[in-house]
Image (cartoon, rainbow, N blue to C red):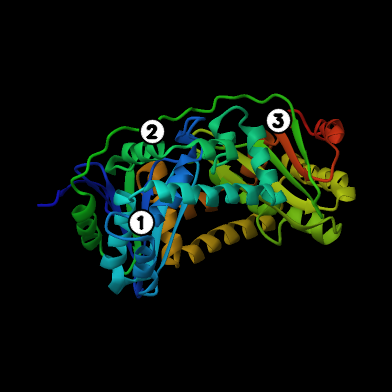
Amino acid sequence: MPDKQVKKESPEVVTLKNGIRVVAATLKERKSVAVGIWVAVGARHETQKLAGVSHYLEHLVFKGTHKRTANQIKESVEGVGGSLNAFTSEECTCFLVKSASRHFENVFDVLSDMVLSASLKEADIEKERTVILEEIKMTQDQPSQLADENLSELLWPEHVLGRPIAGTLKTVKGLTPDEIRNYRDRYYRPGLITVVAAGDIASKKLVSAVESRFGRTQALQEPQTAVFKGVQSKPKVKIFNKKTEQVHLALGLHSLPKEHPDQYALDLLNVVLGGNMSSRLFNEVREERGLAYDIGSYQRHFNETGAFMVSAGVDSKKLPEALKVILAELEKVREHLVKPDELKRAKEFYLGQLELGLENSMSQMLWIGESVLATGKPKALKEITRRVEATRLEDLKNIARRLFVRGSLNLSVVGEIPVSRQEDFLKVLSCFPHSA
């Protein structure tokens, strides 16, 4: 007999005896279902020696199981019109599939087989090693991604969060088949697994499918996490001199962790500054001054830390001006309230994008999975709407004054810029306000 559910954390979350969590979001009038198997282990749980193993393993589960070859995996899903994918982040690994709901049992059997029973043959490991090394080299050839990686190194120096998710050429070359297998056997267990489905699926059906495939395996141990405790007191700059058509800059400041009480104020400030084509950075840097084609802001959140970032691609001769304009826009929201109509538009955009995303079964599955891993339960749209609507002009200014300070500035530049220019950029950053 399969294990029965023993605890309901909420109407949408079922926890089995062995610790696996199951969440079904039934979407009316859908004929498809998106399913994700979330494993709560990622790049930040790796030792330096094993850097890149989570991402490596993500690749390898597609290479075959004890029951299916790589081709059979792909054909079983794509042959019924479905799609199969996966991703690795700092704090989790997710394997996902989407198909017509009538094929749910078939595609979920394939997905669970991959996660639980990947064969991890030595020949496949060696073949995929070359693929991953080429992927790492490709990132090095893409200036915007390289600028982002270098910025992470500045923000979280000598910490696992500052390392590339895929690892380095050295660490990937050094990973042994036994290390990869041991890592899978240690962490790919129900205590660290959450299964989320959204679309034409009932909770009872999903729970039954999970119980029949995962119900008897047990969790072994929790992954170890090195908490970031670093404190930055002065600006930092890293220049990577590389022949490019554009110079790519990434500016970052230490920010909020996941589920922080002020997260919605910062989310709305992000929309105002660089979240869309109506944003201040887009209008000032691109539309008014013609300094960049691509300009925007974004955020990264982890359990205990986070970052607010601005990225742009500019002509090397226009880099100093572009940087000054970006800093000036950050300073404006520190010193002055945004306009009431700006905040209103930001709220409408934020909630509108969220509502549009949740109409899509895959987007809803990802949204639920991320929130369950972070808090143990799905977020409630009504509560988010309430908190967004309650955010005031003063809240945006207060969070800007707290986070946008000189000592927290980090600048990563990739392009034909001499490393000797580092001091020039430090001088520009040093003109930014020192504190709230």
- Up/down of 216 relative to 201, above or below: above
Q: Nearer the viewer, residue 263 or 366?
A: 366
Position of residue 63 measured from the top left corner of the image (x, y, whole percent): 40, 56
- At x 57%, y 47%, the residue is 133
Quadrant of the image occupied by residue 198: bottom left
Name the residue carrying label 1: 64
Which of the two labelled residues, at mark 2 and mark 3, occupies the earlier sequence position? Answer: 2
Identify residue for label 2. 223
Between the residue at mark 1 and the residue at mark 2, the CA separation in whole angstroms equals 26 Å
Secondary structure state at the residue bearing disc 1: loop
Q: Which amino acid type corresponds to the residue marked 1 in the rendered image?
A: Gly
**Residue under the point 68% across and 45% down:** 146
Mark number displayed over residue 436? 3
Does residue 416 lie above or below 114 as drawn?
Answer: above
Q: Amino acid at mark 3?
A: Ala
- Which sits earlier in the primary sequence, circle 3 or circle 1? 1
Q: Is residue 380 visible?
A: no
Marks 1/2 in contact by CB < 8 Å: the verdict is no
* Circle 3 SS class: loop
- Point out the tag, 1 or 2, that comes first from the N-terminus: 1
Label 2 is placed on what type of residue? Pro
Q: In the drawing, does residue 33 fall left or right of residue 352?
A: left
State which mark lies toward you, 2 or 3: 2
